Image (tube, rainbow, N blue to C red):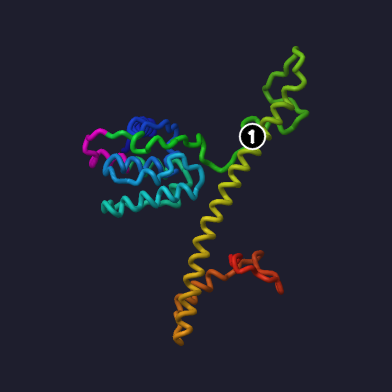
Amino acid sequence: MGESRTELLAWLNDLLQVNYTKVEQCGTGGAYCQIMDSVFGDVPMARVKMNAKHEYEFIANFKILQNVFRSHKVEKPIVVEKLVKCKMQDNLEFLQWIKRFWDTNYGGQGYDAVARRRGAPTDTPATIAPLAPSRGSSTTLHTGAPRAGGRTPISGHRAGSTQPNELVQNLQAQLREMSTHLEGLEKERDFYFSKLRDIEILVQGQLEALEAEGKDDPLMRDIQKILYSTEEGFEVPEGGAVDEEETF
């Protein structure tokens, strides 16, 4: 049996001088990178985003971790697509494994985690899950209804304004959360679109070069077919012009 969540978090916070409260927060990838840095001392911590808040930033951290594993011949698969979802069980199992690896390979040398990060911020969201209604929103959206089990003020000149004020604050908090979430989704979309666009250009260039030589490459044709395929509801309208930069 591996260590409990409490034990793992205590070890992690002590080693890295951070203040994680949930194992799920390790799904950002930054902590895993720095644990390996404490062992090997050569992780490019300047590129690790310890305060990552969006999935595309988590993925970038895990790519650094994969490179570290590869360069040091660490034979352990990193299931990135699961870990970045910040689910407790997936990250608990990986953190237990990485703790065992650290126990076996850490040389006992001193490790200054803050200096290695060069003072980079480490604040991690308390909850890295899909957006949920803000606290109290489920009960305050019905403006005229009393809250179950709540107490209604019977005196004081602000008694009538408390609940509407709470509602406004909750809605404003939800709006801020949604705006931040949307910004992250847009950045993630652009990140993957850029990769697909690069692939499209490479495939197109290779096919044109082969065509000039009177040759063909079935594999490239298949890749191009996948890139240009559409699904129901996403077809290009008949007669509609498609901008070259809007291929996907």
Horizontal side, residue 148 vs residue 53: left or right: right
Residue of label 1: 173
Q: Quadrant of residue 193?
A: bottom right
Q: Quadrant of the N terminus?
A: top left
Numbered disc 1: secondary structure: helix
Q: What residue is rendered at 40% in x and 45% in y? A: 48
Q: Which residues are magenta?
A: 98-110
- Few, some or many residues within 10 Å of mark 1 (<14, 14–19, 20+): some
Q: Residue furthest bottom?
A: 214
Name the image quarter holding residue 7: top left
Between 233 and 152, which is closer to the camera in this rendering? 233
The image position of residue 212, as x and y in percent, is: 47, 84
Residue at (40% x, 32% y) in the render: 18
Query: Which quarter shows the C terminus?
Result: bottom right
Residue type pointed to by label 1: Ala
Say whether residue 109 is magenta. Answer: yes
Does residue 177 lie above or below 226 as drawn? above
Q: Position of residue 156 (x, y in %)?
A: 75, 13
Please state the horizontal and vertical placement of residue 88, each as a whole percent of the image: 45, 40
Left or right, 66 with respect to 186, comes to left
